[in-house]
Image (cartoon, rainbow, N blue to C red):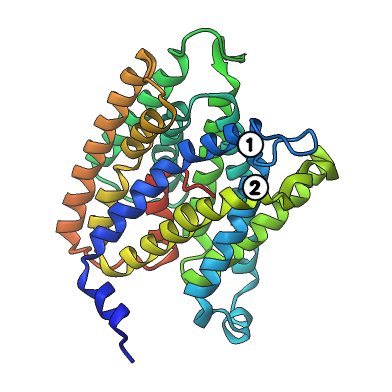
């Protein structure tokens, strides 16, 4: 039965939901940093109640609840029983890489460097995913996508190596690299590897099962690893009313609205439209860092960001040509398409 709410949702073009979701996801890094700064001004028991680990853990729980509501019809024993051993191994691997390792590294990067740096360095994921797809999966791509990937990679390298002095740095291959930028790069590598695993083994897994297991298992793994690394006291503030007061805002806006609008938009919009909208996530992230945190871009960020944006433009030309040639205008509802589009967005707040 179609309700008035459903009819209202159906009347709004899918790309509108995608634009709102990308704006929310783009702002998530700046919002996360702002919340931790508020927590640092209101210690509870000698600890910051809105630590990055608490935000990630509680945010993932909120996301899991949203996914269970959206995909509840796919969560049943019959569908789970049909998963092969290879598919189950693939989901566990993806959960470790993109549900626990990558978010942990990105949140660590947010604690060590500017949000703008995290956004730009995170653009390492799409070109790395493309390179691994060509190498390991023998995928065929056009020269525009290759040129775009090369430009984006050069932009990331410029962003890293041209950083001004002052940040905590280590030397790699003779180049000084900030620890925060390195964490963001490692997070992007983990996400790229996760995408390849998904393309290789999870093409037939229902998107709902994939999303729920990745988020749920990733949350458990992250929690266990944090307990081992930091001890039981690290999550002492997770029950703080002050934390939940702000996580209610974070959870509703970033997690619930962001995830819900993203899923609704993907169901209604074409793949090419979703790809174009997702490409604007870095711009949204940089603007959010400026308006929320007053982060003024540095010369390194201007130079690297300009080259990255050129790469995104070249990639979009290639994607549009490929879509028009193949008539690839279907909806983005599979695991492969979801991962490809998520690679364009980068950090989504969880």
Q: Tell which of 296 and 136 is nearer to you.
A: 296
Residue at point 47%, 48% (across, down): 348
Disc 1 on helix, strand or loop? helix
Q: Is residue 15 above or below residue 36?
A: below
- Mark 1 and mark 2 lie on one chain; the one further toward the N terminus is 1
Q: Tell which of 303 and 9 is nearer to you.
A: 9
Residue at point 16%, 50% (across, down): 321
On the image, the x and y values in percent for residue 63 come to 55, 60
Image disc number at residue 243? 2
Left or right, 158 with respect to 190, comes to left
Mark 2 crowdedness (10 Å alpha carbons): few <14, some 14-19, many ≥20? many
Q: Tell which of 104 and 31 is nearer to you.
A: 31
Q: Tell which of 58 and 281 is nearer to you.
A: 58
Disc 2 on helix, strand or loop? helix
Could you give the CA–CA distance between mark 1 and mark 2, rounded to whole angstroms? 8 Å
Q: Is residue 210 visible?
A: no
On the image, the x and y values in percent for residue 160 come to 46, 19
Mark 1 crowdedness (10 Å alpha carbons): few <14, some 14-19, many ≥20? some
Q: Is residue 1 visible?
A: yes
On the image, the x and y values in percent for residue 94 come to 59, 55
Left or right, 30 with respect to 328, comes to right
Res 287 → quadrant? top left
- Do the CB atoms of the residues marked 1 and 2 lie less than 8 Å apart? yes
Left or right, 66 with respect to 85, comes to left
Image disc number at residue 39? 1
Quarter of the picture containing the N terminus is bottom left
Residue at point 18%, 43% (across, down): 317
């Amino acid at each position: 039965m179609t309700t008035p709410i459903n009819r209202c949702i159906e009347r709004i073009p899918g790309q509108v939901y995608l634009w709102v979701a990308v704006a929310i996801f783009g702002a998530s890094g700046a919002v996360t940093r702002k919340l931790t700064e508020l927590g640092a001004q209101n210690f509870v028991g000698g600890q910051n109640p809105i630590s990055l680990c608490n935000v990630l853990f509680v945010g993932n729980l909120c996301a899991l609840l949203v996914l269970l509501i959206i995909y509840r019809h796919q969560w049943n024993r019959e569908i789970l029983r049909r998963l092969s051993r290879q598919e189950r191994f693939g989901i566990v691997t993806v959960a470790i890489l993109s549900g626990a390792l990558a978010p942990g590294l990105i949140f660590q990067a947010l604690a060590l460097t500017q949000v703008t740096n995290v956004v730009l360095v995170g653009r390492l994921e799409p070109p790395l995913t493309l390179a691994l797809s060509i190498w390991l999966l023998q995928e065929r791509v056009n020269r525009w996508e290759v040129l775009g990937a090369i430009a984006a990679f050069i932009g990331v390298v410029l962003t890293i190596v041209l950083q001004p002095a002052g940040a905590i740095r280590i030397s790699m291959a003779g180049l000084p690299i900030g620890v925060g930028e390195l964490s963001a790069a490692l997070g992007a590598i983990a996400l790229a590897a996760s995408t390849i695993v998904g393309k290789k083994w999870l093409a037939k897994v229902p998107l709902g099962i994939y999303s729920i297991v990745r988020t749920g298992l990733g949350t458990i793994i992250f929690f266990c690893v944090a307990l081992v690394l930091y001890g039981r006291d690290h999550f002492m503030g997770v029950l703080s009313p002050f934390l939940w007061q702000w996580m209610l805002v974070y959870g509703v806006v970033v997690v619930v609205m962001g995830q819900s609008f993203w899923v609704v938009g993907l169901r209604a919009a074409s793949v090419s439209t979703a790809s174009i909208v997702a490409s604007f996530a870095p711009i949204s992230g940089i603007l959010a860092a400026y308006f929320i945190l007053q982060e003024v871009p540095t010369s390194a960020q201007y130079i690297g960001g300009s080259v990255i944006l050129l790469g995104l433009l070249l990639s979009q030309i290639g994607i549009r040509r490929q879509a028009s040639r193949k008539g690839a205008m279907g909806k983005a509802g599979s695991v492969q398409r979801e991962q490809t589009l998520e690679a364009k967005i980068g950090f989504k707040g969880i």
